[in-house]
Image: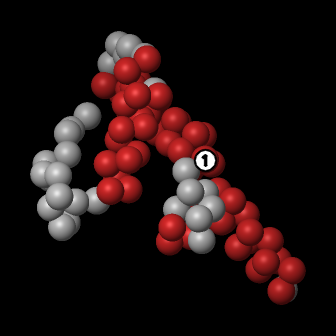
C-alpha cells in the first residue's frame, strides 16, 4: 500500500479517499496478515466490494452507498422500460 502524498489542508486533498484509507487501515488491514502481495490485493479488493461499497454513503450519489444507488437506478430503468 502506498501512503497519501498530500499534506493536510491542501486544497487538492481528497477527503473521501483519506476517509477510505483510514477506515480500511483500522477496520481491516491492521487486523490481518498476508503472505503475499497478491493475497493482500485480493483481500483489500474484496473488502472494498463487500463492505465499503455497501456501507459508506457518498454525497455525489445522494448520500446512499454505491450498491444501493446502482440498485435504485437499475430498478427505475426496468420500471420505465
Taking depth in this image into account, of 69 and 15 the one nearest to the observer is 15
Horizontal arrangement in the rendering, residue 45 relative to residue 65 (left or right):
left
When the figure is inspected, residue 15 is found, relative to residue 2, above or below; the finding is: below
Residue furthest bottom as drawn: 80
| Image location (x, y in percent) of residue 56 | 55, 50
Taking depth in this image into account, of 22 and 2 the one nearest to the observer is 22
Horizontal arrangement in the rendering, residue 62 relative to residue 14 (left or right):
right
Residue occupying image coordinates x 62% and y 62%: 64
Residue 25: which quarter of the image? top left
Taking depth in this image into account, of 46 and 63 the one nearest to the observer is 63
Residue occupying image coordinates x 60% and y 40%: 50
Residue 80: which quarter of the image? bottom right
Element marked by disc 1: helix
| Image location (x, y in percent) of residue 69 | 65, 65
Identify the image quadrant of the N terminus. top left
When the figure is inspected, residue 66 is found, relative to residue 48, above or below; the finding is: below
Residue 67: which quarter of the image? bottom right
Residue occupying image coordinates x 19% and y 66%: 12
Counting every numbered tag in the picture gives 1
Horizontal arrangement in the rendering, residue 64 relative to residue 31 (left or right):
right
When the figure is inspected, residue 17 is found, relative to residue 3, above or below; the finding is: below
Identify the image quadrant of the C terminus. bottom right
Query: Alpha-carbon neighbours of circle 1 within 10 Å: few (<14), some, or many (≥20)?
Result: some
Taking depth in this image into account, of 18 and 47 the one nearest to the observer is 18
| Image location (x, y in percent) of residue 74 | 74, 71
Residue occupying image coordinates x 31% and y 25%: 37
Horizontal arrangement in the rendering, residue 30 relative to residue 54 (left or right):
left
The residue indicated by pointer 1 is 55
Amino acid at each position: 500500500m502506498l501512503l497519501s502524498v498530500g499534506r493536510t489542508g491542501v486544497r487538492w486533498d481528497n477527503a473521501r479517499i483519506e476517509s477510505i484509507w483510514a477506515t480500511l487501515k483500522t477496520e481491516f488491514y491492521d487486523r490481518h496478515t498476508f503472505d503475499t502481495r497478491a493475497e493482500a490485493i485480493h483481500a483489500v479488493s474484496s473488502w472494498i466490494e463487500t463492505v465499503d461499497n455497501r456501507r459508506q454513503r457518498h454525497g455525489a450519489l445522494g448520500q446512499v452507498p454505491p450498491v444501493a444507488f446502482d440498485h435504485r437506478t437499475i430498478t427505475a430503468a426496468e420500471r420505465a422500460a
